[in-house]
Amino acid sequence: MIRLLTVIGARPQIIKAAAISRAVKNHFQDVIEEKILHTGQHYDSNMSQVFFDELGIPAPDYNLSVGSGPHGVQTGKMIAGIEEVLLEGKFDGIILYGDTNSTLAGAVAASKIHIPIFHIEAGLRSFNMTMPEEVNRIVCDQLSSICFSPTQTGVDNLRCEGFFDTPAKFNNGKGRLVINCGDVMYDNSMFFAKLAKEKSDVISRIGVKPNEYILSTIHRPNNTDNPERLTSIITALLALSKQEKISLVLPLHPRTRNLLDKNLSSVIYETLMTSPLVKIIPPASFFDIIMLEKNAKIVVTDSGGVQKEAFFFERPCVIIRPETEWVEIVDHGAGIIANADYNNIINGYHQLVGNKVEFPKLFGNAHAAEEILREIVNYLG
């Protein structure tokens, strides 16, 4: 029996883990024993526990409860806790997702004690080293035994970084593999879409109509903590809502909600909070966010995950960042990079809603989790 430790800590990782846990249960329970470690990086119930309950993910076997804090302090606590669990549990491998501090900590802890690392969402690059996520994903890729890329672009990025030229050799004597496996989030989105329609009443609950609202998520610190950028984004969204007579739905991270009155002028803040067209809601559950994405006229976001999910559900997307890891979305005309520029956000909206947008199948066949586990079994077998 192969023992695998899945490490999660942030909301997107919890969702991604659902696909792997489901595949273990349905196809690999005779050969894989999975244990789940929650670092506690996101510890608010709306940001974490609701997803275990809703998606049917097994309860974590370990919880480090590290909470928030400076990057070094938070990551250091995680490294120590993950290393202890890996040693005591005698695990054969560790599964890591994405690019959070939990990802970095798991990679460092496992590499030091020679436990194979399997990185899901490998090869993504923003080419912006000021982003903590970029540092985390690069380090994790370098330490991984198998880099599971969701797209060909990710594979190409790793090729450009020399992953195919000088393959690393690990303690087990095996080299590194780079595999285009498709996206586990596409697995989840397709699997849960029907269930979301049955379970979620968010559209009627918040009082909006399908295809008659903008869905926007804003959570990255360079947007929320910068008054100039946050003001530009919010004023553009308010202008669009008013001009187009369309609702604006804003599921806000608690941290972002707390920064609004601090980083917006009193006039803009008051307009945002009192406009009958604006629906500010708590962080949406997975079923709720699926329904909000599927029924939006357009999505405006700084979230990589929401960009992809919008694409999965054939919704155009204005990206309020200076770059994106999901370049395929932009290359195929389904997304526009507007950064935090007022005019670019306005123009991006009109360009996307005014033209026919294509949504080709770029992210696999909705069976990425099964392929990932097959490759891990073969690697460790």
Image (cartoon, rainbow, N blue to C red):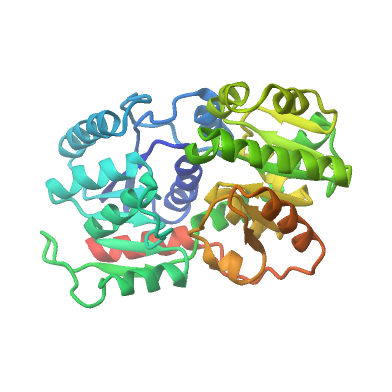
Which is nearer the eye, 104 or 193? Answer: 104
Query: Which sits in the foreground, 158 or 233?
Result: 233
Residue drawn at x 25%, y 33% is 72
Compared with 86, 1 (above or below) is: below
Does 347 sit above or below residue 330?
above
Residue sitting at 73 percent across and 24 percent down?
267
For residue 353, which quarter of the picture?
bottom right
Residue 90, position as x, y percentages in the image? 17, 42
Could you tell me if residue 287 is visible in this image?
Answer: no
Count of all numbered marks drawn on residues in the image: 0
Q: Quadrant of the C terminus?
A: bottom left
Which residue reaches farthest bottom? 165
Residue located at (19% from left, 42% from top):
109
Left or right: where 51 falls relative to 85: right
Q: Residue 308's x, y, as percent? A: 58, 56
96 left or right of 270 in image: left
Looking at the image, residue 15 sits to the left or right of residue 40; the answer is right
Nearer to me, 188 or 97: 97
In the image, residue 182 sits, relative to residue 134, either above or below, namely below
Q: Residue furthest right?
A: 245
Position of residue 70 measured from the top left corner of the image (x, y, whole percent): 32, 29
Residue 361 coordinates in the image, percent (x, y) = 61, 70
Residue 58 appears anywhere in the view = yes
